[in-house]
Amino acid sequence: MRFKSIMRLEARTLAPIVSLFLLIVGTALVVPGFLKLSIVDGHIYGSLIDILHRSTPTALIALGMAVVIGTKGIDLSVGAIIAICGAVTAVLTTSTELHPLIVLGCALLAGMACGLWNGTLVAVFGIQPIVATLILMVAGRGIAQMITGGQIVTFHSDFIDAIGNGFFMGLPARVVLAAVIVAITILVLRKTALGMFLEAVGGNSEASRLVGIDSKLLIIMVYVFSGFCAALAGVIIAADIRGADANNAGLWLELDAILAVVIAGASLSGGRIYLGLTIVGALIIQTLTTAILTSGLPAQYNLIVKASIILLVLLLQSKVTQNFIKARVQSFRRASDA
Amino acid sequence: MLNERYLPVIATLLVFILLYGYGMVEYKGFRDTLVFTNLLTDNAFLIVTAVGMSFVIISGGIDLSVGSMIAFVGVLLAYLITGLGIHPVYAAIIALCTATFFGMIMGVIIAYFEIQPFIVTLAGLFLFRGLAYMINLNSVPIDHELLVTLSEIYVPLPGRGGLTFIAMAMLALLAIGVVVAKRTRFGLNVYAVGGDVQSAALMGVPVKSTLVRIYALSGLYSGAAGVIFAIYTGSAYPLAAVGVELDAIAAVVIGGTLLTGGVGFVFGAFLGALIQGIIQTLIIFDGSLNSWWTKVAIGALLLMFILMQKAIVHFTRRYSGKNPEPPEQPALEKVEST
Amino acid sequence: MTDVNQPPLLSIEHINKRFPGVRALNDVSLTFHAGEVHALLGENGAGKSTLIKVLTGIYTKDSGDMMLDGRNVHIRNSLDAQSNGIRTVYQEINLIPTMTVAENLTLLDQPRRFGMIRWRSAQSRAKEMLARVGLDIDPNSLLVSHSIAVQQMVAIARALGSKARLLILDEPTASLDSDEIARLFGLMRQLKEQGMAIIFVTHFLDQVYAISDTISVLRNGSHVGTFKTSNLSQTELVGHMLGKDLDMLQHDQRDVTEAEEKPVVLSLSQVGKTGMLKPVDLNLKQGEIVGLAGLLGSGRTELCELAYGSVRPDQGNKAWLGKLLPINTPKQAIEQGMAYCPEDRKHRGIIAELSVRENLILALQSSRGWWSRIPMAEQQAIVSEFIERLSIKTSDMEKPIGELSGGNQQKVILARWLVTNPTLLILDEPTRGIDVGAHHDILTIIRELCEEGMSLLVASSEVEEIVAFAHRVVVLRDRGKVSEIAGNQISQKSIIQAIAQ
Amino acid sequence: MKLSKTFTSMLPALVASTAVLLSSPTFAETYGFSQIGSESGWRTSETNSIKAEAEARGIDLKFSDAQQRQENQIKAVRSFIAQGVDGILLAPVVETGWDQVLREAQRAEIPVVLIDRGVDADPSLYLTKVASDFTEEGALAASWLAAETNGVCDIVELQGTVGSSAAIDRKTGFDSVISNFPNMNIIRSQSGDFTRAGGKEVMESFLKAEGGGSNICALFAHNDDMALGAIQAIKEAQLQPAEDILVLSIDAVPDIFRAMADGEANATIELNPHLGGPAFDAIAAHERGEEVDKWIKANGPLYLPDTAEAEYQARR
């Protein structure tokens, strides 16, 4: 019996991991040297590290998005928050003498303020998450441009630069930073009762109310967290190019993040938060992009490949298909039993 | 007696009149009918898209693929006309059928595989843009005398203004949309599905086929918007209409349609698109404001309309005994066999 | 009124319907005549709603025949049912709240010309339909702008349509006040005169006697019997519904002794809420089990909700251990030491995606706050203790609770509250839809808890059960308290008589 | 009473101010400028240059940012026509699709000057085009590279946004020249979307795909921003940009001069952002009734590291 339940768990968690594995193996067959890792100047170097490096912004916002979606919500505004926080970082660095740590703090606070706004609209005003966050999605980039004055603000700050491009123990610093955030999030959600409460609210808000859980505060916190993740991603993206590009930074990244969560197997109707698998989902999306880039496939095929793979994953994950497969498996078993 | 459900539309109309009045007082050129007919012509493709989107949103869904669809249809048209030498009328018919077909496929996935419209149409967003890239990467002129003739058709009005073919086509499509929504069984079924999908099913509304038809209709309308865009610019460009889906959703919401479904007017989408257009026009007339004000202003407007709708819904719910979320009929409990 | 010689409008013969693990309808045969109001009665799980769904084509029967006017008919979906003149009005008004009255009335059947709906003629048709049910409202008004009663009448008007022959009213009066019910009955009589066959499902016995000509009783999926209303006493009827033969109930055993004078834990004085429950007085003593008896819809659940505070009462006061306290939210209730297992386990009890462990630990964790998480080892200890103590059958405490059987889900929800060690435990239908073994287990637990000094408020539709454990029984009827029976006075017979009065 | 009194007393002032408002456009020439957006550093310097030029000449410039969308630009041009401006500057985001709106401007007798790129329309529809030739830029870049490497070089290319005319023409120009050199090959070509982030990411993948970058002789980026992103990628791959891999790009934004001065880039071709002067001159000439050339070429020179420091100081 116990074995069976482990099997069930594995089948679900295995799907994204196997997909990632297959994707990497497939790419390695097409692109020689894809798996090669070498140590140059004490830094680990190779395509796989690149994927980690590149996927940090997506992974970070997908982390926040996973928690939001777990509570039956969605956050469309993360792309705009990235632009705002990148702008805050750049403008504060260039126009003030503030310590970079304070600049970083201001950017993170700006992101959390955006999250607070979203959370308030959702939890207090009872506006559907998709609408509530659409407002900031539309207006946010405008606000970011207002901050930068519509220009790409280039800035130099060794500290911020270290976040975006530095190395820590041979690994890209931002990967380490993101890993730490992911680890802390997993710890907080699993080692406090927060994760359980969030999943309870997402799974059955009425039952949660009856056991005395204050869902409003939780939901606000969730959006603030998503804002925080987006802010950090915004700083990393700005640090990456040493400039804040209000128009393009994080553009359509919210869609990638939602996709990562869906690939992880979470339903948009809430109830389960798979943090680890969401990161795998983000890695899948990035591997796909990197694979297309390194394989030399013309740029115009990127979207088609991406869309086809998404559709495939969605169709395979849908209840209808799963039920169909289950029925098939059962009838096969019955046939083989007989 | 004024029906309370017209309130949002009337509010939208008032905002439009106020903005227009402001323009008339502030800028000389604004008093010409030209400004108004320009609004009709310039926003024609957006209005047509928003009309299709209205049906989707009234049914409680969302369609993110419309912007890509516009680009895809444009590129397809160019290929059919200049590449294959097909007469524009036939080319347009083929393109519209293709768009409808793709919309229908998304509808089938949504209705029968029970995957959220958000994710399905997101895949559509990537897919159609990718297909457009496959056909053609450049912006290409569509050389055909018919297109030139069409774009030259012009019913002059006093005050430099004039109704272009595009504006008239848009008005015709708008009128058809209004009639379909209010005067056909399909239209009423859309409202019923959006109002309460379970009740609708119990009342005998064919929910699944209605959903398929809704997304096919949205495909058709965004396809028509693509044709209009092609006539408007006399060319095709795979990067055209990026982000139009958000403009269309905003237009629908500003026009008083609830994203929760069931409530709204196709005509409201027309007003919503005109309001966005007039904000843009005012900003251009001013000439010193930066474009990000458009985004911020539209975001603020969205917020205002959503809060207003929330208040109206709250007000009407007080008189309704129906729970906001009616519980499902309790299913038969399984009795343990052991 | 009913012409027995006339062939029945609809007859069903040997209908069977099974669901995995349950026989929902077991060889049911019934006949329905034109010009007759036929009450269909039975407690929850008796098979009424399954039968109605078979009649209206939402479920397909496994076997058996349906004859309309003596012809065999196959009803595969709701459109089939409608075209055969079978129309249904549900308790939960199944209309579109966001549409107008006229739109609701004519949906899918609008008068058209060249494919275009003619609203003028649709409106006049809507007016006619409304006139048939005696409503004079603006067909252009939004459905939600009307009271529930009017919405219900609109639903009936829609169901009647033009070709209705058999009208099924599934608990239509649940949310109506007495004037509105009188109005509805007037309409039903009028329809009866016109030769309509009406199936009337309700829990209100008064209403059954006020309007019906014939009564059929279902129990556990089987047809118990069909009676002429005039020949059946209320007490007999309740006996049939509950499966008790009153003559056999003279000497039922009671092994419960009266609780001694103990301090009052929770005291309700004139607590009620308009449209939900008439004001009620109730005192719950320490170590006492108070049973709430009454048929479905009598206000049992409502009293539990108001006592717990999951619904805020709009009148009356609550006192906890002698002190007046505002207990108006679950949080406040839990802080005082209350616990509540709701009746609707699926929608208000379990969180299906979460594991048995998480569901079980949730209330305790919630009372401790999110920061101080109960260590995993302690959780597992608590969970395995309760899995053993309540003999919860699960392969694994990490299994999603949605995959457990109803009885085991119920035990987990019960355990969820027991771990918080409450002073007062409110149980609404703790034994609903669970098998015999689990049923027995839960009754044993209830007794043990009481002996440990816990107070319990238990609502149940099973009179036998209440008699078996209650120190005091509060009988509810028509959303109000009708009597209180204590000590040796408690017997199945006395309760049934109080319900049936 | 009081309110109406106040109102009556304000009335003359209101009328007067309205009159001023109505007549104000006659004081100065009003031009409209429809800009593509602010997607790159070069674009921003172009905007600022044209705004500054207009201010210096006392021109009332109506500025409109189209956020990379053609429909917004068409709207802007139409609004300018409705406003009755004296001239329109248009930096078209794509080449096609302008016939209709240009015809309308012509009907309204408003001269249109195309800025920094051309359109695929009858030349009679616009006054002139003040722009460099993207194809020539590409060709110039290729020629420099051919000379620098003696016609032997494996090149990686960072394209602009897929479908944009700058990307297409620069590629065409570049390809046309290197096709004459059998030993010059483009071994990798991908779009970096004209952004720094895109440039960096794509360059990283190039480096990985080409054995750590040892096979790559030169990088040709369709704009400086992508080159700047790519330079970071090269540095992070432990290679020396401008030495191990030649870095060649187009636009001449200040930051690329900084990079050249630091020895991290080899050459940039100026895409002249100071197009306001020639454009306004052309309109003025047209108003005087003079003939204006259909293409006022504003090709910039190729800059090399030797002058980079001075250029950087001059431009920042």
Image (tube, rainbow, N blue to C red):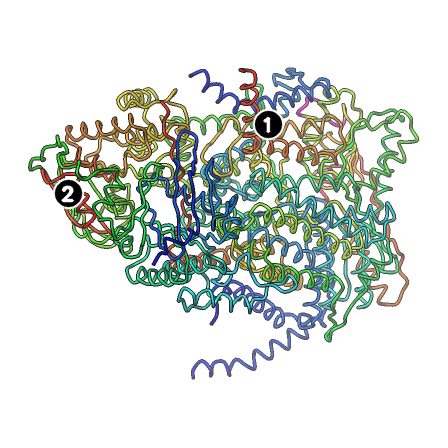
In the displayed structure, does residue C67 sit left or right of residue B139?
Answer: left
Q: Quadrant of the C terminus of chain B?
A: top left
Q: Are marks 1 and 2 on the same chain?
A: no
Q: Which residue has dot 2 on it?
A: C494
Q: Which residue has dot 1 on it?
A: A283
In the displayed structure, does residue B37 sit left or right of residue B311?
Answer: right
Sort mark 2 into few (<14), some (14-19) or many (20+) by Cα contacts within 10 Å: some
- Rendered position, C287 above or below D22: above
Viewer-proximal residue among C50 and C348: C50
Region of the chain picked out in magenta, as a range: D236-242
Residue furthest toward the front? C5
Q: Is residue B234 visible?
A: yes
Sort mark 1 into few (<14), some (14-19) or many (20+) by Cα contacts within 10 Å: many
Identify which residue is drawn at 43% across, 84% down: D1
Q: Amino acid at mark 1?
A: Leu
Viewer-proximal residue among A278 and C401: C401
Query: Which label lies toward us, 1 or 2?
Result: 2
